[in-house]
Structure formats: structure tokens, C-alpha cells
Image (spheres, rainbow, N blue to C red):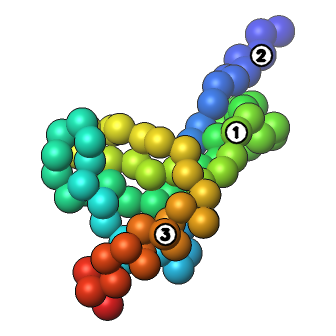
Amino acid sequence: MFFFFVCGTQDFSSNLKGYENLRVVCPRCHNNAVIPRKRRQFFTFCFIPVIPISWGEELRCTICGYYQDTNKEQLNGMIHQHPQQWK
């Protein structure tokens, strides 16, 4: 008898709540497309998330894929630097 099992990793990232309107200029492609994301990556077994591999907050460019780890203190600092942009 032969059983076929599928293992891999899956990214379950989502927008970071409270920072939906924050957009930053990407240092790589220079577009205003970097958004804060809540990163969650899991090891999957038969497409079911089993073990978390990594998690945290990051800034990710929606155009070129650039990413940088961040935290909420840095995000709050970005908002207070340019408050007129985040209304």
C-alpha cells in the first residue's frame, strides 16, 4: 500500500491591525508600496499548519518583495514623523 504525504511551508501573513493606512517608500524600488505585515510562517503536513517556524512584524513591499523586520515602536515613530500623511 502506498501513501502520499505532502510536507512544506506556508506563509499566513496578514495586514498589521492598527497600521492599515501606513505606507512607506521602498528603499529598493522607490515606490510608495511598503506596508506593515504580521508575519506567520508554518510547517505544513498535508496542507495543515502544524509547527510555527517564524512570526513577528515586518515591512514588506507589495511590488518588489523587499522586507525588513520591524516592531510597533518603530511603526509608531514613522507615524509621528509625518502625521499629516496618516489621517
Cβ atoms under marks 3 and 2 closer than 8 Å: no
Give how far across and how far down residue 19 sits, in percent: 47, 74
Sort mark 3 into few (<14), some (14-19) or many (20+) by Cα contacts within 10 Å.
few
Q: Which residue is mark 2?
A: 3
Label 2 secondary element: loop
User: Rounded to the nearest whole Å, what is the CA distance between mark 1 and mark 3?
Assistant: 25 Å
The amino acid on which the numbered mark 1 sits, given as a three-letter code, is Ser
The amino acid on which the numbered mark 2 sits, given as a three-letter code, is Phe
Q: Which residue ends up furthest to the bottom in the rendered image?
A: 87
Residue placed most toward the observer, 28 or 73:
73
Would you identify the image quadrant in which residue 45 lies?
top right
Give how far across and how far down residue 25 sits, in percent: 24, 55
Which residue shows up at 55% across the image and 52% down it? 70
Label 3 secondary element: helix
39 on left or right of 54 = left
Give how far across and how far down residue 62 sits, in percent: 29, 50
Q: Quadrant of the N terminus?
A: top right
Cβ atoms under marks 1 and 3 closer than 8 Å: no
5 on left or right of 32 = right
Q: Which residue ends up furthest to the front in the rendered image?
A: 81
Which residue shows up at 26% across the image and 42% down it? 27
Q: Is residue 12 something that shows in the picture?
A: no
Q: Which residue is mark 3?
A: 77
User: Rounded to the nearest whole Å, what is the CA distance between mark 2 and mark 1?
Assistant: 29 Å
Q: Earlier in the sequence, mark 2 or mark 1?
A: 2
User: Rounded to the nearest whole Å, what is the CA distance between mark 3 and mark 2?
Assistant: 52 Å
Sort mark 2 into few (<14), some (14-19) or many (20+) by Cα contacts within 10 Å.
few
Where residue 54 is drawn, which disc sits there?
1
Give the vertical position of 39 relative to 80 (above or below): above
- Say which of marks 3 and 2 sits in front: 3
